[in-house]
Amino acid sequence: MSLLTGLGKFGLKYLEDADLFEEEKKKENQSDKAKPAVTVMAEEDYLFDKTYECPVCYGSFKERTVRTGKAKLMRTDLDLRPVYDNFEPLKYDVVVCPHCGYAALSRFFTGMPSFQQKAIKEMMATTNTRPLQKKDTYSYDEAVDRYKLTLAYAIVKHAKTSEKAYVCLKGGWLLRSMGEYLRKVAPDQEQKWQELKEQEDEFLKNALEGFLTARQTENFPICGMEQFTLDYLVSVLAMNNEQYEVAAKLISGILTARNANNRIKEKARDLREQLIIKVKGKSVNK
Protein backbone atom coordinates (compact mmCIF):
# COMPACT_ATOMS: atom_id res chain seq x y z
CA MET A 1 0.00 0.00 0.00
CA SER A 2 1.28 3.43 -0.91
CA LEU A 3 2.07 5.95 1.80
CA LEU A 4 -0.45 8.33 0.18
CA THR A 5 -3.24 5.86 -0.51
CA GLY A 6 -6.63 7.48 0.08
CA LEU A 7 -5.88 10.90 -1.33
CA GLY A 8 -8.48 10.25 -4.03
CA LYS A 9 -11.24 11.29 -1.68
CA PHE A 10 -9.67 14.73 -1.63
CA GLY A 11 -9.49 14.91 -5.40
CA LEU A 12 -5.74 14.24 -5.32
CA LYS A 13 -5.65 10.67 -6.60
CA TYR A 14 -2.81 11.53 -9.01
CA LEU A 15 -0.53 11.95 -5.99
CA GLU A 16 -1.25 8.58 -4.39
CA ASP A 17 1.79 6.98 -6.07
CA ALA A 18 4.02 10.03 -5.85
CA ASP A 19 7.63 9.74 -4.66
CA LEU A 20 7.79 11.76 -1.45
CA PHE A 21 11.43 12.78 -2.03
CA GLU A 22 11.46 12.96 -5.82
CA GLU A 23 12.36 16.66 -5.87
CA GLU A 24 15.28 16.19 -3.50
CA LYS A 25 16.54 13.25 -5.55
CA LYS A 26 16.47 15.32 -8.72
CA LYS A 27 18.43 18.10 -7.02
CA GLU A 28 20.97 15.61 -5.70
CA ASN A 29 21.45 14.03 -9.12
CA GLN A 30 21.89 17.43 -10.72
CA SER A 31 24.41 18.36 -8.04
CA ASP A 32 26.37 15.16 -8.63
CA LYS A 33 26.49 15.85 -12.37
CA ALA A 34 27.79 19.33 -11.73
CA LYS A 35 30.65 18.11 -9.52
CA PRO A 36 33.96 17.68 -11.33
CA ALA A 37 35.30 14.16 -11.48
CA VAL A 38 37.83 13.35 -8.75
CA THR A 39 41.25 12.88 -10.29
CA VAL A 40 43.18 9.93 -8.89
CA MET A 41 46.89 10.50 -9.38
CA ALA A 42 49.03 7.64 -10.62
CA GLU A 43 52.21 6.92 -8.69
CA GLU A 44 54.31 8.29 -11.57
CA ASP A 45 52.61 11.67 -11.17
CA TYR A 46 54.30 12.16 -7.80
CA LEU A 47 57.77 11.56 -9.20
CA PHE A 48 60.42 13.11 -11.42
CA ASP A 49 63.96 12.23 -12.49
CA LYS A 50 66.70 13.92 -10.48
CA THR A 51 70.33 13.82 -11.59
CA TYR A 52 72.96 12.49 -9.17
CA GLU A 53 76.70 11.91 -9.30
CA CYS A 54 77.89 8.78 -7.55
CA PRO A 55 80.46 9.55 -4.81
CA VAL A 56 82.12 6.16 -5.40
CA CYS A 57 82.51 5.83 -9.18
CA TYR A 58 81.61 9.43 -10.14
CA GLY A 59 79.11 8.20 -12.72
CA SER A 60 76.16 10.48 -13.53
CA PHE A 61 72.63 9.10 -13.55
CA LYS A 62 68.98 9.91 -12.91
CA GLU A 63 66.92 8.53 -10.03
CA ARG A 64 63.21 8.69 -9.29
CA THR A 65 62.50 11.41 -6.72
CA VAL A 66 59.32 12.68 -5.06
CA ARG A 67 57.97 16.02 -6.25
CA THR A 68 57.81 18.47 -3.35
CA GLY A 69 54.27 19.30 -2.26
CA LYS A 70 52.54 16.72 -4.45
CA ALA A 71 51.72 14.16 -1.75
CA LYS A 72 48.99 15.03 0.76
CA LEU A 73 49.93 14.44 4.41
CA MET A 74 47.12 12.66 6.25
CA ARG A 75 48.59 12.08 9.71
CA THR A 76 51.78 11.45 11.65
CA ASP A 77 52.23 8.26 13.66
CA LEU A 78 53.36 8.34 17.28
CA ASP A 79 56.97 7.68 16.21
CA LEU A 80 56.84 10.60 13.73
CA ARG A 81 56.27 8.48 10.62
CA PRO A 82 54.41 10.68 8.08
CA VAL A 83 51.44 9.01 6.37
CA TYR A 84 50.33 10.32 2.98
CA ASP A 85 47.14 9.87 0.99
CA ASN A 86 47.39 7.19 -1.71
CA PHE A 87 51.18 7.40 -1.99
CA GLU A 88 54.27 6.25 -0.06
CA PRO A 89 57.30 8.55 -0.51
CA LEU A 90 59.47 6.19 1.56
CA LYS A 91 59.72 3.89 -1.45
CA TYR A 92 61.75 6.56 -3.25
CA ASP A 93 64.14 7.73 -0.54
CA VAL A 94 66.91 5.35 -1.57
CA VAL A 95 69.34 6.34 -4.34
CA VAL A 96 71.14 3.53 -6.16
CA CYS A 97 73.94 4.08 -8.66
CA PRO A 98 73.23 1.99 -11.79
CA HIS A 99 76.94 1.97 -12.68
CA CYS A 100 78.63 0.55 -9.58
CA GLY A 101 75.66 -0.36 -7.37
CA TYR A 102 76.36 1.93 -4.41
CA ALA A 103 73.19 2.75 -2.45
CA ALA A 104 72.33 5.26 0.28
CA LEU A 105 69.42 7.30 1.51
CA SER A 106 69.13 10.56 -0.43
CA ARG A 107 70.17 12.50 2.70
CA PHE A 108 73.52 10.71 2.78
CA PHE A 109 74.20 10.01 -0.90
CA THR A 110 76.25 13.06 -1.88
CA GLY A 111 79.70 13.53 -0.43
CA MET A 112 81.83 10.81 1.11
CA PRO A 113 85.09 10.70 3.10
CA SER A 114 87.97 9.00 1.30
CA PHE A 115 88.12 6.13 3.82
CA GLN A 116 84.50 5.23 3.05
CA GLN A 117 85.10 5.33 -0.69
CA LYS A 118 88.14 3.10 -0.24
CA ALA A 119 86.21 0.58 1.85
CA ILE A 120 83.43 0.34 -0.74
CA LYS A 121 85.84 -0.02 -3.68
CA GLU A 122 87.74 -2.76 -1.86
CA MET A 123 84.48 -4.61 -1.28
CA MET A 124 83.44 -4.21 -4.91
CA ALA A 125 86.81 -5.54 -6.09
CA THR A 126 86.33 -8.79 -4.21
CA THR A 127 82.61 -9.42 -4.72
CA ASN A 128 80.30 -9.77 -7.67
CA THR A 129 78.04 -6.78 -7.04
CA ARG A 130 75.08 -6.39 -9.40
CA PRO A 131 73.74 -2.83 -9.82
CA LEU A 132 69.98 -2.40 -9.69
CA GLN A 133 68.29 -0.89 -12.71
CA LYS A 134 66.14 2.20 -12.40
CA LYS A 135 62.39 1.72 -12.84
CA ASP A 136 59.53 4.18 -13.24
CA THR A 137 57.97 2.98 -9.97
CA TYR A 138 58.92 0.48 -7.27
CA SER A 139 56.79 -2.12 -5.58
CA TYR A 140 56.94 -2.44 -1.80
CA ASP A 141 59.07 -5.57 -2.08
CA GLU A 142 61.52 -3.80 -4.38
CA ALA A 143 61.65 -0.79 -2.06
CA VAL A 144 62.38 -2.99 0.97
CA ASP A 145 65.23 -4.66 -0.94
CA ARG A 146 66.66 -1.22 -1.73
CA TYR A 147 66.64 -0.34 1.99
CA LYS A 148 68.41 -3.59 2.84
CA LEU A 149 71.02 -2.82 0.16
CA THR A 150 71.44 0.66 1.65
CA LEU A 151 71.97 -0.81 5.10
CA ALA A 152 74.55 -3.23 3.71
CA TYR A 153 76.55 -0.37 2.19
CA ALA A 154 76.28 1.59 5.43
CA ILE A 155 77.97 -1.33 7.17
CA VAL A 156 80.64 -1.66 4.47
CA LYS A 157 81.58 2.03 4.52
CA HIS A 158 81.63 2.21 8.34
CA ALA A 159 78.87 4.82 8.37
CA LYS A 160 78.04 6.79 11.46
CA THR A 161 75.85 5.03 13.98
CA SER A 162 73.14 7.61 13.38
CA GLU A 163 73.07 6.91 9.63
CA LYS A 164 72.60 3.19 10.18
CA ALA A 165 69.91 3.91 12.78
CA TYR A 166 68.13 6.27 10.38
CA VAL A 167 68.10 3.64 7.63
CA CYS A 168 66.62 1.17 10.12
CA LEU A 169 64.00 3.71 11.20
CA LYS A 170 62.84 4.45 7.67
CA GLY A 171 63.02 0.78 6.74
CA GLY A 172 60.76 -0.01 9.69
CA TRP A 173 58.33 2.70 8.63
CA LEU A 174 58.28 1.30 5.08
CA LEU A 175 57.48 -2.20 6.35
CA ARG A 176 54.62 -0.76 8.43
CA SER A 177 53.30 0.98 5.35
CA MET A 178 53.57 -2.27 3.41
CA GLY A 179 51.63 -4.07 6.14
CA GLU A 180 48.88 -1.45 6.06
CA TYR A 181 48.65 -1.77 2.28
CA LEU A 182 48.47 -5.55 2.55
CA ARG A 183 45.64 -5.29 5.06
CA LYS A 184 43.65 -3.28 2.50
CA VAL A 185 44.24 -5.38 -0.61
CA ALA A 186 44.58 -8.85 0.96
CA PRO A 187 43.04 -8.87 4.47
CA ASP A 188 43.17 -12.68 4.58
CA GLN A 189 46.99 -12.75 4.39
CA GLU A 190 47.45 -12.77 8.17
CA GLN A 191 50.66 -14.81 8.14
CA LYS A 192 52.31 -12.43 5.65
CA TRP A 193 51.22 -9.45 7.75
CA GLN A 194 52.72 -11.03 10.87
CA GLU A 195 56.00 -11.56 9.03
CA LEU A 196 56.06 -7.90 7.98
CA LYS A 197 55.30 -6.83 11.56
CA GLU A 198 58.20 -8.92 12.86
CA GLN A 199 60.52 -7.37 10.29
CA GLU A 200 59.29 -3.88 11.19
CA ASP A 201 59.91 -4.54 14.89
CA GLU A 202 63.44 -5.78 14.15
CA PHE A 203 64.27 -2.70 12.08
CA LEU A 204 62.91 -0.34 14.75
CA LYS A 205 64.69 -2.22 17.55
CA ASN A 206 67.97 -1.61 15.73
CA ALA A 207 67.01 2.03 15.13
CA LEU A 208 66.52 2.41 18.89
CA GLU A 209 69.89 0.86 19.66
CA GLY A 210 71.65 3.04 17.11
CA PHE A 211 70.03 6.31 18.16
CA LEU A 212 70.75 5.65 21.85
CA THR A 213 74.43 5.30 20.96
CA ALA A 214 74.41 8.29 18.61
CA ARG A 215 72.96 10.54 21.36
CA GLN A 216 76.08 9.85 23.42
CA THR A 217 78.70 9.97 20.69
CA GLU A 218 77.59 12.44 18.01
CA ASN A 219 76.83 16.13 17.86
CA PHE A 220 73.39 17.56 17.16
CA PRO A 221 71.61 17.90 14.84
CA ILE A 222 71.51 14.15 14.21
CA CYS A 223 69.96 13.15 10.86
CA GLY A 224 68.37 16.58 10.74
CA MET A 225 66.84 16.29 14.22
CA GLU A 226 67.59 18.58 17.12
CA GLN A 227 67.99 17.03 20.57
CA PHE A 228 64.41 17.09 21.82
CA THR A 229 62.91 15.75 18.60
CA LEU A 230 65.36 12.86 18.67
CA ASP A 231 64.76 12.29 22.38
CA TYR A 232 61.02 12.13 21.75
CA LEU A 233 61.49 9.68 18.88
CA VAL A 234 63.80 7.49 20.94
CA SER A 235 61.37 7.53 23.87
CA VAL A 236 58.61 6.21 21.57
CA LEU A 237 60.89 3.48 20.22
CA ALA A 238 61.97 2.60 23.78
CA MET A 239 58.38 2.41 25.01
CA ASN A 240 57.40 0.15 22.12
CA ASN A 241 60.34 -2.12 22.99
CA GLU A 242 59.29 -2.20 26.67
CA GLN A 243 62.34 -0.21 27.76
CA TYR A 244 60.10 1.84 29.99
CA GLU A 245 62.81 3.34 32.21
CA VAL A 246 64.65 4.70 29.17
CA ALA A 247 61.43 6.18 27.79
CA ALA A 248 60.47 7.74 31.12
CA LYS A 249 63.89 9.35 31.54
CA LEU A 250 63.87 10.90 28.08
CA ILE A 251 60.28 12.15 28.44
CA SER A 252 61.12 13.73 31.78
CA GLY A 253 64.12 15.44 30.21
CA ILE A 254 61.94 16.99 27.51
CA LEU A 255 59.27 18.19 29.93
CA THR A 256 61.78 19.84 32.29
CA ALA A 257 63.95 21.43 29.59
CA ARG A 258 63.53 25.19 29.40
CA ASN A 259 64.55 25.36 25.75
CA ALA A 260 62.23 22.61 24.47
CA ASN A 261 59.37 24.09 22.42
CA ASN A 262 55.72 23.73 23.38
CA ARG A 263 54.89 21.44 20.47
CA ILE A 264 57.39 18.77 21.48
CA LYS A 265 56.47 19.16 25.15
CA GLU A 266 52.81 18.55 24.34
CA LYS A 267 53.71 15.42 22.40
CA ALA A 268 55.86 14.29 25.34
CA ARG A 269 52.95 14.78 27.77
CA ASP A 270 50.69 12.65 25.58
CA LEU A 271 53.39 10.01 25.35
CA ARG A 272 53.83 10.01 29.13
CA GLU A 273 50.13 9.14 29.53
CA GLN A 274 50.51 6.22 27.15
CA LEU A 275 53.64 5.09 28.95
CA ILE A 276 51.82 5.08 32.31
CA ILE A 277 49.06 2.91 30.84
CA LYS A 278 51.58 0.45 29.39
CA VAL A 279 53.52 0.18 32.65
CA LYS A 280 50.33 -0.42 34.64
CA GLY A 281 49.20 -3.01 32.10
CA LYS A 282 52.48 -4.89 32.39
CA SER A 283 52.26 -4.85 36.20
CA VAL A 284 48.72 -6.27 36.12
CA ASN A 285 49.74 -9.07 33.75
CA LYS A 286 52.65 -10.23 35.89
Image: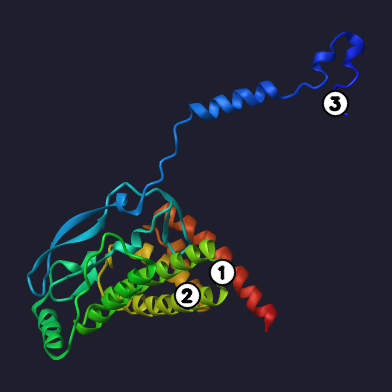
**Quadrant of res 145:** bottom left
Q: Residue at x 53, y 78 (%)?
A: 242
Q: Earlier in the sequence, mark 2 or mark 1?
A: 2
Residue holding disc 3: 3
Residue 1 position, x and y percent, is 88, 29
Per the rendering, the mark at residue 131 is none
Q: Nearer the viewer, mark 2 or mark 3?
A: 3
Q: Nearer the viewer, mark 1 or mark 3?
A: 3
Task: Describe the element under mark 2 as helix, strand or loop.
Answer: helix
- Amino acid type indicated by mark 3: Leu
Are the residues flagged by discs 1 and 3 in contact, CB closer than 8 Å? no
Q: Quadrant of the C terminus?
A: bottom right
Q: Residue at x 27, y 50 (%)?
A: 67
Tally the numbered discs. Answer: 3
Q: Earlier in the sequence, mark 2 or mark 3?
A: 3
Residue 50 higher or lower than 94, as above or below: above
Q: CA distance from mark 2 to mark 1?
A: 25 Å
Residue 122 position, x and y percent, is 11, 87
- Amino acid type indicated by mark 1: Leu
Please indicate whether residue 44 sits to the left or right of residue 24 in the image.
Answer: left
For disc 1, the neighbor class at 10 Å (few under 14, some 14 to 19, many from 20) is many
Residue holding disc 1: 275
Q: Residue at x 21, y 83 (%)?
A: 158
